[in-house]
Amino acid sequence: MMRARPRWPVAAAGVLFLASLALFWPGIAMYDSVVQYGQVLAGAYDDWHPPAMARLWALFGPTGAAPLFALQMGSYWLGLGLIAAALAAAGRRGAAFAVLAIGLWPPFLGWQAAVLKDAQMLGAMLAAVGLVGWWRLRARPVPWPVVPVVVVLLGYAVLVRANALFAVLPLCFALWRRPSDLRWRAVALVVATLAVLAAMPFVNHRLLGASPSGVERTQALYDLSAIAVRTGDGAATGLAPDAIAGLRAHGCVKPFFWDPLGDADHCEPYVEALHVGPPGALYVRLAGAILRHPLAYAAHRLAHWNSTERWIVPARLMGAGPPNHSEANTLGLAGPGWLAVMWQRLADWLIETPPGWPILWTMLALLLLPGAWRRMDAGARLALALLASALALEASFLVLSIASDLRYHLWPMVATALAAVLLAQARWWRGRGLAIVLAAVALAGGVTRLALPLPPQGYQAMVAG
């Protein structure tokens, strides 16, 4: 039965939104943020960073990072507030508090203060899920006027991160109540994914006016170089023997990221041959190399997946904690004050604990999935959609990922946390089995962090280390 006065979580989320603005104002501009704002000021865009975000930024004029910071923080708290309000309306007061607590967890809130495509994606997806959840969790259909708003939010999420479609499309198909045939949904999902991938260059280059930057080559460069280093096969990878020897001697292929291969002073000269010809031909070559050396490719991808999941890795691996200051720039992009710095330092410490590792959330999502699948109530259906989205994105990193920054996992981590709250009333997942699995994952990661030496600290040291 519905309870009275269900909207207090929305008011609480509004207060937390204002407090977040005050704490982090005017937002934190990272390196990518500075580059994009420079494009906004120059009126010239490329596709290395999402042109949709830069075009949106340009609508506010030369006003710095504050408008986008407020937008992404507002959508973040709007989505969480609506989900919490719907749970409170259903009499689940504790669950409503838990949803707001998820938003307050320092690593999540700290990263949402960075004006970055990942935070834009997280905010847009949370707002969309919040709008759907506000109606679905109260056993009501989503009104048709709300549907276009949800579509715009999810469409923006797809445009603002290249791999976001692996999270957005499964979410949409899981939320879509009809048709119920699972095989039809699977086929439609594959077709939709291929269609969006094919349309992205047209949207970015023709509609949004971004010039090609060569970003589409990076995945193939990374994987071909790794196969070459592991096998020495120049014929399959397109690299000469002396280039392969150079890649090996200088440690150019790292599980952590592809960046050394793009560094002109480090490894880029060794992969010059892979910059010749159309990008499509490069991926045809990669497909041939994978067929010829499947074990080498699998070993490379699993090593990177482990790195980006931050499981069997050393402590203090860079790219985890949210930034506490803006990148030095001459564009007028300022940073927040000392209170924000203290908050981010707390977040940096917490992110080194097991709840800050993406692998723990991936395992939790896998463990929650069967129970969400078996239940038929509105909360379980929304949880199932969140888990499908989170796991699909995490699975995509097995094939499509070139860096291990934790911010790429923000949506799966938050989505899994929300799913856990939605399913908290179910008794089936409170048993010892789930706790044992998560404890084993955490123990393996913790032992590794104690045993392995610290990695190089800082970007340049990591590239050359």
Image (cartoon, grey):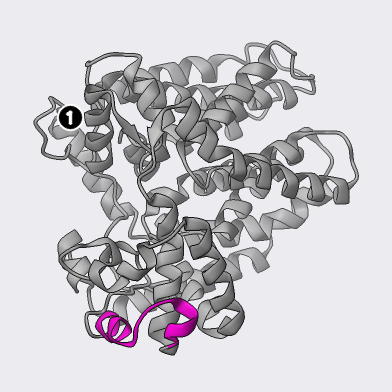
Q: Quadrant of residue 126?
A: top right
Element type at marker 1?
A: loop
Question: What residue would you read off at disc 1?
Answer: 336
- How many numbered badges does the structure rendering display? 1
User: In front: 85, or 357?
Assistant: 357
Q: Position of residue 225 (x, y in %)?
A: 39, 74
* Badge 1 amino acid: Pro
- In the image, is 408 to the left or to the right of 251? right
Q: Residue at x 30, y 77 (%)?
A: 450
Q: Residues within 10 Å of mark 1 (few under 14, many from 20)?
A: many
> Is residue 104 at all visible to an observer of this figure?
no
Give left or right: position of 358 versus 254.
right
Please check the rendered image and state whether residue 198 is part of the magenta-colored stretch, yes or no: no
Q: Position of residue 332 (x, y in %)?
A: 12, 24
Q: Look at 28% across and 33% down and name the residue there.
A: 36
Task: Please say whether residue 68 is visible from this viewpoint.
Answer: yes
Against 201, residue 255 (above or below) is: below
- Which quadrant does the C terminus fall into? bottom left
Picture layout, residue 367 above or below residue 188: below
State the quadrant of the N terminus: top right
Residue 234 falls inside the magenta stretch: yes
Residue at image point 17% right, 29% down: 336
Dominant SS of magenta comes to helix
Residue drawn where x is 20% and y is 41% of the image: 324
Range covered by the magenta-colored residues:
233-248
Apparent side of residue 380 relative to residue 274 in the rendered image (left or right):
right
Residue 295 placement (x, y as % from top left): 56, 84
Image vertical order of residue 447 relative to residue 371, above or below: below
